[in-house]
Amino acid sequence: MSDQPVAEAPQLGDVSVPELYRSGRAKQRRSQRNRIISYVVGIAVVATVVLAGDWGKIQRLYFSPGRAKDLFPEILTIATKNTLLYTAGAFIGGVSIGLVMAVMKMSPIRPYRWFATAYIEVFRGLPALLTIFIVGYGVPTAFGTQFPTIIGVGTAGPIALALVAGAYLAETLRAGVEGVPRGQLEAARSLGLSQAQTMRTVVVPQAFRLVIPPLTNELVLLLKDTALLSQLGTTAATVELTKFGKDQFQIDFNGTPFIAAGVMYLIITIPLTRLAAALERKLKASR
Amino acid sequence: MTVPAIELVDLHKAYGSNEVLKGIDLVVEAKQVVCIIGASGSGKSTLLRCVNRLEEPTGGHVLIDGVDITHPDCDLDLVRRNIGMVFQQFNLFPHLTALGNVTMAQRKVLKRSEAEANANGRAVLERVGLAEKADAFPSQLSGGQQQRVAIARALAMDPEMMLFDEATSALDPELVGDVLEVMRSLAADGMTMLVVTHEMGFARRVADHVVFMDQGVICEQGPPEQVLEHPATPRLQQFLQQVLEH
């Protein structure tokens, strides 16, 4: 008994994986080989671009500090300012239209639902640029009027963008309201809150959390879509970032203004999406 | 002669051709505790939800303190503030703290001042043993604590009567006791209660009257010792046997 060798307790790492579940050597080698190939291809592409490009010329034509300096202050005081104004106008208008359409779409009254459905289908189905032309050129011609100018910029563009955004936001907002569980409404109504009070104090605050991410997304999309307004006639005072970049490019065919305009867009959009992500995390934490 | 707190007269509810309630007559006197038992699908939750018309009856009448609340002129919002309701899934408002949950309707519906609502809110939280959780959000509370806040939320409105819809069915077994204890103390204080439950022990000890429902009708009713100890119908005998086996 005593001279029997004592079996050592097996350590967890020692236990070999049974044949049935063992990953084959061939499989491991294959996945390793695929990864090496993808790295090599990637490096080759980058190297080709770097070697083939005339970097002096690229720097001169696209990253010229002198040319960039010329863009100031107009790129900020006119172009970026106008882009922000167009975006804000379109977003506020779009949210307002979207709210009305969402409420109509959820209405028990059938003609309201029909109208909202028709509106949403039409403006989601048309290219945004066509809507911009119809509002910017078609409407003034047909009615013999001009859109008013507010804070120095035209309103036709933001109105057209608001019409399109309204169609998308109607569905976003409706999904937010319908995403609030039914039990929440029942609890509120059972306490004696009216339909309207339930909406205001229980449904809307919870729906708001649900729509923050898609709402931010729509805001970023709108900001980029203001570039389409360059297709409407603009003056030096009403120009937005993309048109500004193009106008500046045509002075001396130096591409630096495009890069500068791109940087301005990113300076606005990246913090915006970061902020939305942070807000979403914070709201989720208190849920 | 006193008017019953709740009286159901020939109550019917159907979803399309699916009849869930097939003519219910039931009386709950003031300060009485009535427990409704029965298998799932027997219509007991639907019955309870018809009492404050969260579910719209398709026939019959619901009388609260002798007033027919199925009458079209009846203002449901006014009726509901007197009838507290507790749900299986708690349905606390996740965007409000425990105190926010118990004060919101006091302020919006009863138009109490913030100070008054807060004082009363803290009192009802104290009542359910959760005074120290006033600032916690529902997500930070256990199921049992959430359900007790939900009871406090209903109590904060000073209701005349309370409806409990399987209040302990969604709880882990070890959390059921605290909630039942709160319900028992409410009953002891003379609250009128209509309770849908699977807790036979609670029904036996606390109820004044037990109702057994089966397939949309009241199959048997009476004092708990009669209904639970000496079931007359084979359906109830079978049901009790199944429940007590587990």
Image (cartoon, grey):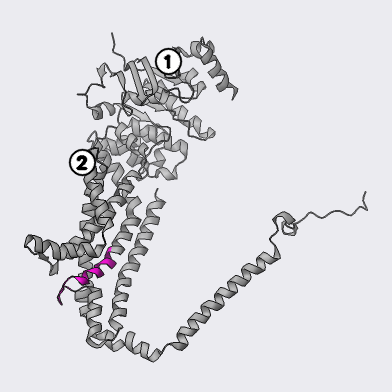
Q: Which residues are magenta?
A: A222-238
Which residue is painted at 22% across and 77% down in the image? A244
Q: Image height check: is B7 above or below B119? A: above
Res B79 → quadrant: top left
Can residue B162 be seen by looking at this rendering? no
Q: Disc 1 marks which amino acid?
A: Ile
Res B51 → quadrant: top left
Compare residues A83 and A134 and report the one nearer the observer.
Answer: A134
Examine the structure image and report whether residue A199 is included in the region drawn in magenta. Answer: no
Which residue is painted at 55% across and 75% down in the image? A39
Can residue B174 be seen by looking at this rendering? yes
Q: Residue A273: horizontal and vertical position, in percent?
A: 35, 63
Where is mark 2, residue-wise?
Answer: A111
Q: Residue B4: horizontal and vertical position, in percent?
A: 31, 14
Which residue is painted at 33% across and 71% down in the image? A266
Q: Residue A153: horizontal and vertical position, in percent?
A: 14, 69
Pinpoint the chain carrying mark 1: B
Q: Image height check: is B1 above or below A266? A: above
Pinpoint the chain carrying mark 2: A
Compare residues B92 and B49 and report the one nearer the observer.
Answer: B49
Secondary structure category for the residue under label 1 = strand
